[in-house]
Amino acid sequence: MLFQKLIKENLKIWNAYIQHNFVKQLENETLSKEQFLFYLKQDYIYLINYSKCYARLALNANTVEELRFAIKFQNYTLEGELELHKSILNLGIDINNFSEKDESLINIAYSRYILSVGENGDFLDMLIALSACAIGYGYIGNAIYKNISQEKLQNHPYKEWILTYSSQEFQTTVKEFEDFVNSYSNQISEEKFKKLNSIFRNVVRLEIAFWEHSLTMQTNI
């Protein structure tokens, strides 16, 4: 399957992404509130641009099925993940006062890279550029949920985040995304896989950089 092949080719950095220190600290409650809010603020801004990337995916669609997929996941991001971030951020940050200067350089680099893939490539290129975030968070949420006891989860400071990304609803969307990627497994040449592999490697590296800058809370390099 295509997505599993991409992971296999990039296993070291994939594991560095889904098992990052940020993820471990979030799980074991050693992540500070300041670091978590910094991450949420940047991720809120990122998800706005990520949603726009699904519009680019829709423009690249060749079939009605691809168009429906792009629109469905754009709506899920806007109505699901963004609303979660908004509800949590309201506890500590006024999202209505966000501006361009609040967006970190890592954030800019990641979202604009995805957009550039769609502008210069085809539907599948863009799909792979979106996949590390769309699927990776499901792997992360599921792993954290399995590692934490129900008793510990009840009083966990990041309970809502964990429950969102480990929920049956989110896991179902992750499987749908992964299955959609895998539906192209028998349609790509060796040369095309090399291109997709390069895109996937880049977005996973950018995911790692996003975690890193959330730990250091640096908006600039």
Image: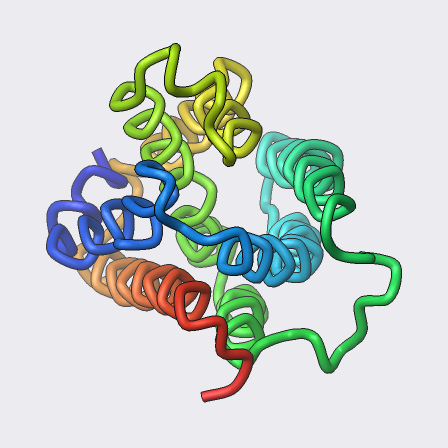
List x then y, in percent, for residue 102: 70, 75
Quadrant of the rendered image containing residue 152 = top left
List x then y, in percent, for residue 219: 55, 79
Residue 67 seen in the figure: no
Residue 43 seen in the figure: yes
In the rendered image, the residue lying farthest to the right is: 96
Residue 144 drawn above or below residue 93: above
List x then y, in percent, for residue 9: 12, 53
Q: Is residue 79 left or right of residue 166?
A: right
Residue at position x 26%, y 63% in the image: 201
Q: Considering depth in this image, is 176 or 134 the residue closer to the camera?
A: 134
Residue 30 drawn above or below residue 147: below
Q: Is residue 82 left or right of residue 179?
A: right
Q: Considering depth in this image, is 172 or 199 the residue closer to the camera?
A: 172
Residue at position x 32%, y 33% in the image: 139
Instruction: For the N terminus, give its image quadrant.
Output: top left
Instruction: For the C terminus, give its image quadrant.
Output: bottom left
Residue 167 drawn above or below residue 198: above
